[in-house]
Image (tube, rainbow, N blue to C red):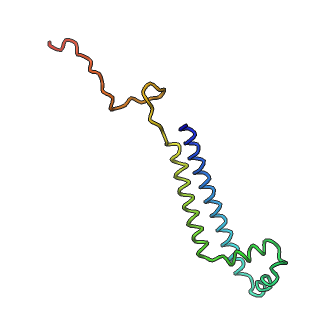
Amino acid sequence: MLRFLRWLVVLIGGVLVGGGLVLHGQVAVARYMREEVDRTFFLWRAIGNATFAFQSDDVRMALVAAETPEEALRESDRAAWVLVIIGGLLALTGPLLHSHRHPGQPGAVPSATKPQTKVPARNAKR
């Protein structure tokens, strides 16, 4: 059962890291598209907005991304960092999970609280 739990924790950590990296990529693309639209001549932007329905998909996407508020991009970037950090912690600490092994099981470590039996010394009165 513990092996499955370790596997599950590492899997969830990997999914969170992957989701955070994808979100980082989406924010970077949105910022790039915003810069490209801002660098475009204002008249071409006005024509693109006026004929939005007739534009290709990539032009539509760039025009819509340019309207995304900067606060939303900052919050998405923070959320992506949180996902990467939490996912990394889960993925790295998952293999460190271990169980308390009972004496008699293979690989069991002797307990320090177990009382040791005292072996009588030979000829102690010499």
Residue placed furthest toward the right: 54
Quadrant in the picture for residue 100: top left
96 horizontally vs 62: left or right: left
Residue lying at the far left in this picture: please name it: 126
Residue at 53% x, 45% y is: 94
Counting the numbered discs, the total is 0
Residue 37: x %, y % from top left: 72, 79
In the rendered image, the quadrant that contains the C terminus is top left
Q: In the displayed structure, does residue 20 sit left or right of residue 96?
A: right
From the top left corner, tell me how far across and down residue 46 is, in percent.
77, 86
Is 66 left, or right, of 12 in this rendering? right
**Image quadrant in which the N terminus is located:** top right
Front residue of 38 and 49 = 49
Could you tell me which residue is drawn at 49 percent across and 42 percent down? 97
- Residue 84 % position (x, y): 57, 58
Q: Residue furthest front?
A: 1
Name the spot of residue 116 as percent of width and height, x first.
Answer: 30, 25
Residue occupying image coordinates x 18% and y 14%:
124
Front in this rendered view, residue 44 or 112: 112
In front: 7, or 56?
7
Identity of the residue drawn at 60% across and 47% down: 11
Indicate whether 53 appears above or below 2. Answer: below
120, above or below 77, in the image: above
Taking 62 as reference, is 6 above or below it? above
